[in-house]
Amino acid sequence: MVKNDAGEVVELRCSYDPATRGGNAPDGRKVQATLHWVSAADAVPAEVRLYNQLFTTPEPNATDFVADLNPGSLEVLTDCRLEPAPGRSKCRGGGAIERQGYFFRDPDSAPGRLVYNRTVGLRDTWAKMQTGTGG
């Protein structure tokens, strides 16, 4: 990747190897990562709400549960870009967003203003924190 003087990524230099599509190459190479992108010309703007664990502890204090609320339980991303298909659909249903989780269209959505809520994340950092394997 190429960065500008401020340390921001301004360019990606990549190669495409069609033999690795699906994660494995015929010669046994293992793919480390797969890039997914949406064409800027076709993308539709959206707000995405990421709901995380509500409490900081598995057993919140019943008499003072507010003290155990997770201040990061809701993260709102306001400058997202999605493929155009969700914007054209009148369906209120949901679907998967690559490697992030499953999302459902929020009733707050309106023509020209899509809003999606994450219902299930694919990476469960809460479980890792509880078992001590990361987080």
Image: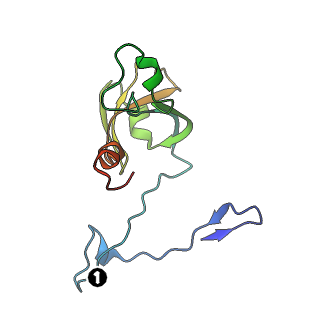
| Nearer-the-camera pick, 83 or 107 | 107
Q: Position of residue 62 (x, y in %)?
A: 34, 16
Q: Residue furthest top?
A: 63
Q: Position of residue 95 (x, y in %)?
A: 30, 38
Binning the other alpha carbons within 10 Å of mark 1 as few (below 14), some (14 to 19) or many (20 upward) gives few
| Colour convention of the picture | rainbow
Q: Position of residue 40 (x, y in %)?
A: 56, 50
Q: Residue furthest right?
A: 5
Q: Up-down: is 50 above or below 20?
A: above
Q: Which residue is mark 1?
A: 29
Res. 57 image quadrant? top left
Q: Up-down: is 119 above or below 37?
A: above
Res. 119 image quadrant? top left
Under circle 1, the secondary element is loop
In the image, taking residue 22 as reference, residue 55 lies left or right, namely right
Which residue occupies 52% across, 42% down?
A: 81
Which residue occupies 28% across, 82% down?
A: 29
Which residue occupies 29% across, 44% down?
A: 127
Q: Quadrant of the N terminus?
A: bottom right
| Nearer-the-camera pick, 76 or 40 | 76
Which residue occupies 33% across, 48% down?
A: 123
> What residue type is disc 1 on?
Arg
| Nearer-the-camera pick, 125 or 123 | 125
In the image, taking residue 3 as reference, residue 27 lies left or right, namely left
Numbered disc total? 1
| Nearer-the-camera pick, 131 or 54 | 131
